[in-house]
Amino acid sequence: GLRAADITAGFRFLWKERGMLAVISLFSLTNALNDTEAVLVPVLVRTELGLSPAQFGLLASFLGAGTLSGAFLMGLVGTRIRSPALAICGSMAIFGGVIVIMGLATHVWHLFGAYFVFGLMFMIGEIASSTLWMQLIPPHMRGRVFSVMGATAMLMNPVGFLVAGVLGELYGVRAGLWIGGGGIIILSVLAFLVPAVRSLDRRLEVMTPESVHP
């Protein structure tokens, strides 16, 4: 397993890589804010939309169809993406927008469509970011950095569930979804405005095979 020294080395690497740190921070905060979907949509469909158990189960089916479609799409065009930073931040902004749309839903088909796009955007952002990290992080650092990234993202989940519950209690289910999704949109735009994030694209353009695989 990883030692404390390995985790510390991962943090030090990310601290020097401000563009990566900004994107990873975006994912970590998104991991908290998208818990508004996990907590508040079940309340919405039960108390306001009156979905049957079968319809509620179909939401997961549409989510799965979206993720599969995202994986298939990235398999076709992923290597042609010229701006991974834009793909990551853009997909996350749409991801947040979908949560806002969930808060506006008045019919089950609205949620079916939203969950399809939800899964699609999640997979695009996930694959684009994973591909970028594999290219920019030296092989001997990948395990350490990925462990730090995973731990940071998971630590935000308990915070996110608490925030989602508080938002729903204070402002209502729909407004809680709007706030959570809107927060993700704002964070995604701000992340792309960070010069170090946009510079990740330029670094890829000048990298040689030897620099990708030292």
Image (cartoon, rainbow, N blue to C red):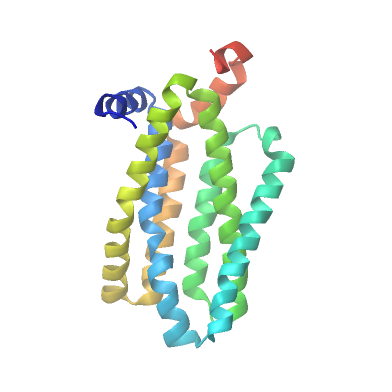
Residue located at (32% from left, 59% from top): 160
Q: Quadrant of residue 109?
A: bottom right
Q: Is residue 180 visible?
A: yes
Tell me if residue 33 comes above or below residue 191 in the rendering.
below
In the image, what residue occupies the spot 43% across and 31% down?
20
Q: Is residue 20 above or below residue 202?
A: below
Place residue 77 in its image quadrant: top right
Query: Could one spot residue 138 in this view of the protein?
Result: no
x then y, percent, for residue 177: 41, 68
Q: Is residue 19 above or below residue 124?
A: above
Looking at this view, is 70 or 98 the one in front? 70
Quadrant (top left/top right/bottom left/bottom right) for the N terminus: top left
The residue at the point 65 percent across, 62 percent down is: 65
| Closer to the camera in the image, 83 or 125 | 125
Residue reaching furthest to the front: 1
The percent coordinates of residue 111 (x first, y second) are 57, 73
In this picture, residue 82 sits left or right of residue 96: right
The percent coordinates of residue 140 (x first, y second) are 44, 20
Is 160 left, or right, of 213 in this rendering?
left
105 left or right of 4 in image? right
Residue occupying image coordinates x 39% and y 56%:
183
Say whether residue 58 is left or right of residue 189: right
Count up the numbered dots. Answer: 0
Q: Picture coordinates of residue 136 (x, y %)? A: 51, 24
Q: Is residue 147 above or below residue 141?
A: below
